Amino acid sequence: MSEIQASQIEYTDVIVVGGGIAGIAIAEYLARHSRLSIKVLERANHLGTGASGKLEGWFHTGALYSGQDDAQTFINCVNGVEDLVNLYAPYFPERCNVSLKETKPALFRPAVIPQPKGWFNDSPVYLIHPQTDSPESRLSDLKSDSVYLELQRNRVLGRLEVAYGQQHNWLREGNCQAPTYAQVEAHEDLDCSLRDSTETVRNLCQRFDASYDMEPSNYEILRTLDCSMNTSAIMRDLVASALAQGVTFETGVTIDKLLIDRYGPIQIKSLLCQTQQGFPKRLKANLFIFSVGEGFEPFLSELQVRARLKRSRSAMVVAEPALIDTNFVRMSTKNRFHFNHFVQHREVGGENFVYSMLADSGYANDAPRNDVDIEPILESAQRYFGKDKLYSRQLFSYECIKTEFISEEEQKRRYSYWIESDPNSNYLCVLPGKFSFFPTVAFQTYQRIKTLIEFDECAPKSPFESETQVEKEAAKLVANSYPIQILAKAAAT
């Protein structure tokens, strides 16, 4: 006689599938503003093990996207700053350290406020934008390249000045309010108040030009609001808040099947799962939210969601100890001249790590023939820092898989968040696009949830006061960022 296999049955008001930054932020924000029971499922043994834990930790406020033809991604980043200041700074006052600061009488702009436990590093990212005497222009035989470079420069100067310069007062009627798309696009003055530099940045530019046997060229160098961020700390604090509000997290869960009612609008009846211990479980809910990044495709197919998504892989290089203590990004109209350097400070188990994250704009479609090549990153790093300095560090490389929303132009990358739902169904799908969009994704998903299910909204207690036990539980659930895992493993051997 065969052994009877039991299956546990659970009901929760809302089930969130995916324990990356999107799923964590959505669950936390919903828990803050409702009394719904919420459960987050994650396939890995820890939260934040995918793209959320592998990126370089760059908080995007729009600088990198200010030169694009279409300003929408830039505006999404700017709006993300507004949502961060309005929705998170008051609730996490010692953690969310981006707030409004009076820089001139009656002129308030967002700024990173130094905090020992702050999510964001107060060292700015310097944006280096080449001009028409730069290596990419001199090495090109196409006159149009210089024209494109100048057009991009003009967009960068104008858009950043409106958003973060002297043109817009972010304090309106007691709230933080970002400039609108129309305001950004209407500004044409190139007198940008964000121009700034340091000796370190100027030396980097000169060394880069010299590597091509060229005299120093001219650069627009801007001090931006972009900065490095502690992604693991953000996820841990959001998880701690969610736990305090009654959210449950279950890791190591594999979803075997979606039981779907296809008569009329698609309705999910249950999720059939396997727990970390291999025990079968049936999960039922009033609403299912899918925010699973890399594993999106099977769900899209089953739910008949028509989405324009693309999986791509990019390379990261970790250098320890850090090469310099300055964050910078070199923009260009040519991919091979892009380069990012971020310095990160982490304390893990009483040990301090200070390391550089190196990357560029290179990416490959997720296919075997399109291997991600780290050689361009190493080549650029050598031009900026010198061969001896670069290879005197411990160097590690790895790939990061990103699932992105694709715009109407098939090959155009558009790092926009994506939320899709059917008002007659009981599920919705979410992609954050970038980690930096988490405040907006959480808020916009919450607005969409209100159209799908009925619940009583409640005002959250503010500010959030974490307890030691909750913090410990959150720390156990959230994985350290991937670079830290690499460095800690190397230190232990």
Image (cartoon, rainbow, N blue to C red):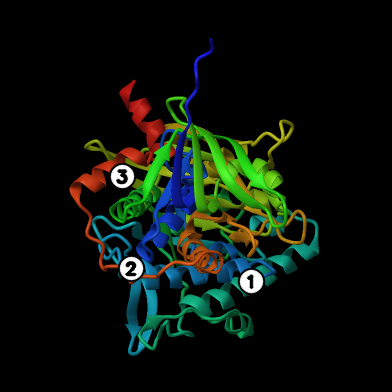
Q: Quadrant of residue 353?
A: top left
Which residue shows up at 45% across the image and 80% down it?
A: 177
Q: Would you call the spot at circle 2 few (<14 residues within 10 Å), some (14-19), or many (20 or more)?
A: some
Q: Quadrant of residue 172?
A: bottom left
Q: Secondary structure at mark 3?
A: helix
Q: Is 405 or 492 nearer to us in this picture?
A: 405
> Is 299 drawn above or below residue 185 in the view shown?
above
Residue 342 at x, y = what percent?
44, 50
Q: Secondary structure at mark 2?
A: loop
Which residue shows up at 58% across the image and 56% down it?
A: 426
Q: Is residue 43 left or right of residue 485?
A: right
Tell me the residue that label 1 is attached to: 71
In space, the residues marked 3 and 2 are separated at their CA atoms by 20 Å
Look at discs 3 and 2 and give the one toward the viewer.
3
Mark before the other along the chain sequence, 1 or 3: 1
Identify the amino acid type marked 1.
Ala
Mark before the other along the chain sequence, 3 or 2: 2
In space, the residues marked 1 and 2 are separated at their CA atoms by 26 Å
Identify the amino acid type marked 2.
Ala
Q: Residue furthest left?
A: 468
Tell me the residue that label 3 is attached to: 474
> Is 453 drawn above or below residue 23 in the view shown?
below
Whether tag 1 and tag 2 are in contact, CB under 8 A, the answer is: no
Tell me the residue that label 2 is attached to: 89
In space, the residues marked 1 and 3 are separated at their CA atoms by 37 Å
Which residue shows up at 34% across the image and 31% down it?
A: 488
Residue 296 at x, y = what percent?
62, 44
